[in-house]
Image (cartoon, rainbow, N blue to C red):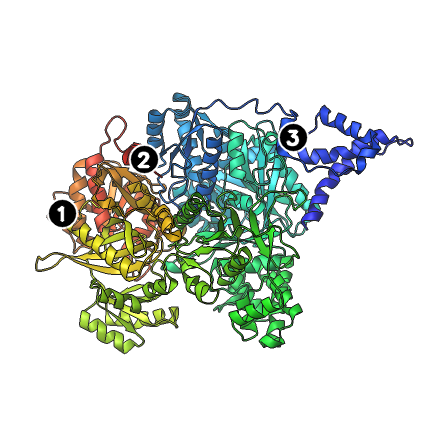
């Protein structure tokens, strides 16, 4: 496929050059003409020097037979063909704007692209200053950036940093939509001109044109590029008028929004009224345009430099037709169903658009393409690095972000070498001899009342990328990467299958599987319902047919070599084959190896193996007959974290990358296995070898055996590697570095865990292991409600529930039993009103080397991933810290830990006034979510210490970091993505709900927390004189405390019912107005918010809402939908009110929290 496309790409070049020559064909001109296109292909420009060389070459027929040397970038640059790097931008110090906390629509891909930009600056000898409050990322460490400010990415704070650092350049295109919007705002205020800061790369004017829908439409009109007919409006009435002109069905999009936020489809005026009301709170301008649902969707990644060299690096095609946001679509690259004519039509249009807009750097263009004709429309252009540019970089091996940063510094494409191959220049279009499938991962089941449909607004939290030589192989790998519970392409149970096929949800591909595997739908019928291209469906039918063939064989011994090989070529896993032939994974593996069927290792070299390439970027396939590499490194395997999901995100990528860097420093060769395109760990120059592969037992063992590896690290990639650790050691006989997997099992299994704690005299809440409801009832009555039910082997509290009554118990227990039939359920006494403490540690052979003790602001019962962490702890006395250390030492010894571990401890006050009780509620024998946070706050790289312990080299002496006195502290706060999850109840419980985190430093708790909260995405501070709305639990006094703090500032106070008014007025001098509060009419409610100028909501409910018309639920949900800051937990709400009372009104000058990280921790140890 790729080969055909490549030839097709050359065809126009060749035909264009070979004009019919006269009858006298002299050999000279003909050869020079025929040879020119090849030089044009390599350099896409010509110089008289080259032509002269070619002519000279053609005159000497004897030389023609010699083998031609592969093009070499260095030799080519040295030849002086280009006056190298004439017009570099004169900058000494550049400010890079990061993207802040990870949220849906803006996740780890910006850690990757920002890190690439910093790397490019470092190479160029330009000092870099980074502003990004996301403490979990790789880019916020001094390995990459010279100075780092953990501060909100807002015009106000960025201006303070500019005043302090005096940079002469700024990069806006590496921090997602956050950085882009910030740049546009600051430019309008004239801040860049005021401080003489040059915007590098794409100009702000171009950014505005690509973001402002009206300007964009006009710009494309000038070059006759068709765009979906649309009208920009800024009010609901205008929207309704516009819809009449355009005609229903229509799609609404918001300008300056990320990941389709605020967009949606409307089939009639009623739907449009609600939709436009919601979108207008998120953006000042919305676009009403004709819907092209059902058309194909495609995307081109384009790179252009200031000298107008322009190339398309990658094109991608969506498996799902238009109507599903590209971030929620399955995507393949290169496109599979476009004719050559369609491919080139869109390629030419992309280059035309990018040149016309004047993009300097990287850009992506999204198209809708008519499924049965040559009509197309441009959907949008992102003049910045996006999620798909991270995907394109990983899919092609072309480092887009790095190249864009170099272009921003003034380099041109022909003078940059291709960083991956090191043998060609960057001025080329990659060719692929494989196919890539990207599949999104959603976590919608974690939220109550959330709408499961997927449409024009993105809801997925992460994505996977699978590489194969056939669509079937690539697609099945992707299914397993999304969640190990899937064996490959498969079905699932649906209440109304046809409905799900027609109106996509997050389980769409499973619905297609169900229809084809179990309901006998034909390709035509599935196409009719889903509008998915038949080419894809026929490929999926091949998988279905092969599965049925295996099922017909029905036994392991009936499995012949040909059939087994055919299945492996289609991407079947051993486990999947075993299920079909009623056998086990180990037996199928043994039989496969007996037949000599093993995967082949192939390189991603960007050149489809046409030129020799020096790359370590690998994948495995059964559709090959030779290896591209030799295996003589015997390196250490580092297992990455896989797909980002709620509970396992960029912080584990930080751990995996740091473990790899530490191993390299210790002189070990490293092999990284990971399949997440958004990550820094899957960059081609982090590990000595990178396998873009599944983290399954089968694949890890394949690679372990091929590489004859010297060990495998399972403790830095979160829960996925932990789950296969025991099997790697027992069945695979692999050498697992660090804590013995049998000991890991003793910590994961609640029963064994509790017995060991009892034996070492460490306290824990009362608990019992259960298999029946009667036992549970008895236990709950003996310890008293509430109780906590949890299964074993979970990450981030999946299926954990707090139960407050007997009825509740009956209903919930049946649910938890479904979660893990192999493991019984554990029920624990739930301690209310207790403080929670986090302890992260590293041990070597059972001896504690370093540890950190952080405290939660919220009471126990809020998941530690959603809690606010304070380090060093500000309210724990030395005695408590000493007791926590003693527990950590006992635990390290009992489990004989080598490597990282983490504990959660509850501090329960003694009602008799004795010393508080410390009870351990959880222990993970792996790196935890808070490792980057504690490492960066304490200035000691915990993963570096852990890695040394794992390999037993240069192990440092134990130090007590908590004894040192520090004159600063940091607070880590969660980033939620409620806005994206329509209908979900914003409420904190034992299930984790946040998608990211930020942390800021300060001299005290108020200063650090003040900055941290403002770092959350799109946070707008309620200013004195505006309205605050109160609601929630009237039995506690938190609301009264909040009012006492903020009353002197002159806010107006409102409540939705009398109880709240009476509570506040009876205990303070404030007056509270009870306002009308329509619960079922969103539009009326929005008008209420506008009428009273409500700019902050404090809703402190005690329990989750039981219905959709619950007043507190409506208040919380609509605060989120209307973009109003919501405080929903008592302790943090009171703390923020205290911050407001101390920090408002704002004082003149640069606030004291604006200091670089190196100044807080005293140097650059990380």
- Between 371 and 477, the one lying in front of the other is 477
Q: Nearer the viewer, mark 3 or mark 2?
A: 3
Q: Tag 1, which secondary structure?
A: helix
Q: Is residue 249 left or right of residue 37?
A: left
Q: Tag 2, which secondary structure?
A: helix
Q: Nearer the viewer, mark 3 or mark 1?
A: 3
As drawn, 177 above or below 332: above
Quadrant in the rendering for residue 545: bottom right
Say which residue label 1 marks: 1065
Residue visible at 66% across and 45% down in the picture: 343
Point out residue 733 in the picture as x, y percentages from the top left corner: 47, 64
Identify the image quadrant of the C terminus. Answer: top left
Say which residue label 2 marks: 1157
- Between 696 and 1046, the one lying in front of the other is 696
Point out residue 78 in the picture as x, y percentages from the top left corner: 63, 27
Residue visible at 64% across and 63% down in the picture: 524
Disc ID at residue 915: none
Mark 1 Cα-neighbour bin, 10 Å: few <14, some 14–19, many ≥20:
some
As drawn, 350 above or below 199: below
């Amino acid at each position: 496929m790729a080969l055909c496309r490549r030839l097709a790409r050359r065809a126009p070049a060749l035909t264009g050059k070979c004009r019919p020559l006269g009858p006298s064909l002299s050999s000279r001109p003909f050869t020079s003409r025929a040879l020119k296109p090849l030089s044009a292909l390599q350099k896409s420009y010509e110089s008289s020097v080259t032509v002269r060389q070619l002519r000279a070459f053609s005159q000497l027929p004897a030389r023609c037979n010699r083998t031609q040397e592969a093009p070499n970038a260095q030799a080519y640059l040295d030849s002086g063909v280009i006056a190298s790097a004439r017009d570099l931008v004169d900058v000494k110090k550049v400010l890079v704007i990061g993207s802040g906390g990870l949220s849906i629509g803006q996740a780890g891909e910006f850690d990757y692209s920002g890190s690439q930009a910093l790397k490019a600056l470092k190479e160029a000898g330009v000092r870099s200053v980074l502003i990004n409050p996301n403490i979990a990322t790789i880019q916020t460490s001094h390995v990459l950036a010279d100075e780092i400010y953990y501060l909100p990415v807002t015009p106000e704070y960025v201006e303070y940093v500019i005043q302090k650092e005096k940079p002469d350049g700024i990069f806006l295109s590496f921090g997602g939509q956050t950085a882009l919007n910030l740049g546009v705002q600051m430019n309008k205020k004239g801040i860049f001109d005021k401080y003489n800061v040059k915007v590098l790369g794409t100009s702000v004017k171009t950014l505005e044109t690509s973001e402002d829908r009206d300007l964009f439409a006009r710009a494309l009109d000038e070059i006759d590029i068709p765009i979906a007919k649309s009208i920009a409006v800024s009010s609901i009435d205008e929207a309704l008028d516009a819809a009449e002109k355009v005609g229903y069905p229509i799609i609404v999009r918001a300008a300056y929004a990320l990941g389709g936020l605020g967009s949606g489809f409307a089939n009639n005026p009623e739907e449009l009224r609600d939709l436009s009301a919601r979108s207008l709170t998120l953006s000042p301008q919305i676009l009403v345009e004709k819907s092209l649902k059902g058309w194909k969707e495609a995307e081109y990644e384009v790179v252009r430099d200031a000298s107008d060299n322009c190339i398309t690096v990658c094109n991608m095609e969506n498996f799902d037709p238009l109507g599903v946001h590209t971030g929620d679509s399955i995507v393949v690259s290169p496109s599979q169903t476009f004719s050559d004519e369609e491919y080139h039509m869109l390629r030419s249009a992309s280059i035309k658009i990018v040149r016309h807009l004047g993009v300097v750097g990287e850009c992506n263009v999204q198209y809708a393409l008519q499924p049965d004709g040559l009509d197309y429309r441009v959907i949008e252009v992102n003049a910045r690095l996006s999620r798909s540019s991270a995907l394109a970089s990983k899919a092609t091996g072309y480092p887009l972000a790095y190249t864009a940063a170099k272009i921003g510094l003034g380099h041109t494409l022909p003078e940059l070498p291709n960083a991956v191959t090191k043998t060609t220049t960057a001025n080329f279009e990659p060719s692929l001899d494989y196919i890539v499938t990207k599949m999104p991962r959603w976590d919608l089941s974690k939220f109550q009342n959330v709408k499961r449909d997927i449409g024009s607004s993105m809801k997925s939290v992460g994505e996977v990328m699978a590489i194969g030589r056939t669509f079937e192989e690539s697609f099945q790998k992707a299914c397993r990467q999304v969640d190990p519970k899937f064996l490959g392409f498969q079905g699932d149970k649906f209440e109304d299958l046809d409905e799900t096929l027609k109106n996509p949800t997050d389980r769409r591909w499973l619905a297609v599987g169900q229809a084809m595997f179990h309901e006998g739908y034909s390709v035509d019928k599935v196409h009719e319902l889903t509008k998915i291209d038949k080419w894809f469906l026929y490929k999926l039918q091949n998988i279905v047919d092969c599965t049925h063939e295996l099922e017909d064989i029905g036994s392991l011994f009936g499995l012949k070599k040909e059939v087994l090989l055919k299945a492996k070529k289609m991407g079947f896993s051993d486990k999947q084959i075993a299920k079909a032939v009623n056998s086990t994974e180990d037996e199928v593996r043994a039989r496969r190896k007996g037949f000599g069927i093993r995967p082949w290792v192939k390189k991603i070299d960007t050149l489809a193996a046409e030129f020799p390439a020096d790359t370590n970027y690998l994948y495995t396939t059964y559709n090959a007959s030779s290896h591209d590499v030799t295996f003589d490194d015997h390196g250490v395997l580092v297992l990455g974290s896989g797909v980002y999901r709620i509970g396992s995100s960029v912080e584990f990528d930080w751990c995996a990358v740091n473990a790899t860097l530490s191993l390299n420093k210790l002189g070990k060769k490293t092999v990284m296995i990971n399949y997440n395109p958004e990550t820094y760990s899957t960059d081609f120059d982090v590990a000595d070898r990178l396998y873009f592969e599944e983290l399954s037992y089968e694949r890890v063992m394949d690679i372990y055996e091929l590489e004859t590896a010297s060990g495998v690290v399972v403790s830095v990639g979160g829960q996925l590697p932990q789950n296969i650790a025991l099997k790697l050691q027992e069945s695979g006989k692999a050498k697992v570095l660090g804590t013995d997997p049998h000991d890991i099992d003793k910590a994961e299994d609640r029963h064994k865990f509790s017995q060991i704690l009892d034996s070492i005299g460490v306290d824990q809440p009362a608990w019992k292991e259960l298999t029946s409801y009667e036992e549970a009832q008895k236990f709950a009555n003996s310890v008293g409600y509430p109780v906590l039910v949890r299964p074993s082997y979970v990450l981030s509290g999946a299926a954990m529930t707090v139960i407050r009554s007997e009825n509740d118990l009956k209903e919930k227990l049946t649910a938890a039993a479904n979660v893990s039939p192999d493991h019984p359920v554990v029920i624990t006494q739930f301690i209310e009103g207790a403080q929670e403490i986090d302890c992260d540690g590293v041990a070597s052979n059972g001896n504690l080397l370093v540890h950190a003790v952080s405290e939660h602001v919220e009471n126990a019962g809020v998941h530690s991933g959603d809690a606010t962490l304070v380090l060093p702890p500000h309210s724990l006395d030395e005695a408590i810290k000493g007791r926590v250390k003693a527990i950590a030492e006992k635990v390290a010894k009992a489990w004989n830990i080598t490597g990282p571990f983490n504990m959660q401890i509850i501090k329960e006050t003694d009602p008799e006034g004795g010393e508080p009780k410390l009870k351990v509620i959880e222990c993970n024998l792996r790196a935890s979510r808070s490792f980057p946070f504690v490492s960066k706050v304490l200035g000691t790289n915990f993963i570096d210490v852990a890695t040394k312990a794992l390999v037993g080299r240069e192990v440092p002496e134990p130090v007590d970091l908590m004894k040192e006195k520090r004159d600063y502290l940091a607070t880590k706060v969660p980033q939620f993505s409620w806005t994206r999850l329509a209908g979900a109840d914003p409420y904190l419980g034992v299930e984790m709900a946040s998608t990211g985190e930020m942390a800021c430093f300060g001299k005290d708790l108020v200063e650090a927390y003040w900055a941290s909260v403002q770092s959350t995405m799109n946070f707008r501070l309620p200013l004195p004189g505006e309205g605050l709305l109160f609601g929630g639990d009237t039995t506690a006094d938190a609301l009264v405390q909040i009012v006492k703090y903020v009353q002197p500032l002159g806010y107006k106070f409102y409540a939705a019912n009398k109880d709240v008014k009476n509570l506040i007025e009876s205990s303070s001098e404030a007056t509270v107005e009870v306002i009308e509060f329509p619960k079922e009419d969103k539009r009326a409610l929005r008008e209420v918010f506008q009428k009273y100028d409500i700019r902050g909501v404090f809703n402190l409910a005690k329990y989750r809402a039981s219905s959709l018309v619950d007043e507190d639920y409506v208040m919380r949900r609509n605060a989120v939908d209307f973009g109003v800051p919501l405080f929903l937990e008592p302790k943090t709400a009171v703390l923020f009110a205290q911050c407001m009372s101390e920090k408002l009104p704002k004082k003149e000058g640069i606030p004291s929290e604006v200091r670089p990280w190196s100044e807080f921790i005293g140097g650059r140890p990380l």
